[in-house]
Amino acid sequence: MTPQGQKYLFDIRRAIDLIEMFVGDTPTFDAYHADLKARSAVDRQLGIIS
């Protein structure tokens, strides 16, 4: 794998870890939906993945 490919995979894994951290203590979808900071943070990380 090329170094650039390795970097992309590292970035994706990091984004997944951060998403898990951002929503890890959110008990329900409604609680997540009400938390603008968490939603914004997750949206940002999903943008990195895509």
Image: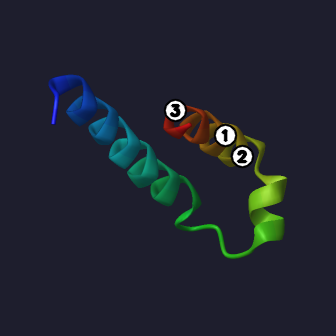
Contact flag, marks 2 and 3 (Cβ < 8 Å): no
Q: Which residue is mark 1?
A: 43
Which residue is nearer to you in this view: 34 or 20? 20
Which of the 4 image quarters holds residue 34? bottom right
Which residue is nearer to you in this view: 40 or 7? 7
Q: Residue 14, position in %: x, y?
A: 35, 43
Say which residue appears at 46% left-offset and 56% top-offset: 21
Q: Nearer the viewer, mark 2 or mark 3?
A: 3
Q: Residue 11, position in %: x, y?
A: 35, 36
Most distant residue in the front direction? 1
Q: Residue 12, position in %: x, y?
A: 39, 42
Report crowding for label 1: few under 14, some 14 to 19, many 20 or more residues within 10 A (C-alpha).
few
Which residue type carries mark 1? Answer: Asp
Report crowding for label 2: few under 14, some 14 to 19, many 20 or more residues within 10 A (C-alpha).
some
Which residue type carries mark 2? Answer: Arg
Q: Which residue is mark 3?
A: 48
Contact flag, marks 2 and 1 (Cβ < 8 Å): yes
Q: Is label 2 in a helix, a strand or a loop? A: helix
Q: Residue 43, position in %: x, y?
A: 67, 40
Q: Is label 3 in a helix, a strand or a loop? A: helix
Q: What mark, if any, has residue 2 been given in the picture?
A: none
Q: Which residue is mark 2?
A: 39
Q: Of label 3 and label 1, which has the lower sequence position?
A: 1
Which residue is nearer to you in this view: 33 or 50? 50
**Measured along the vertical axis of the image, is residue 41 above or below residue 35?**
above
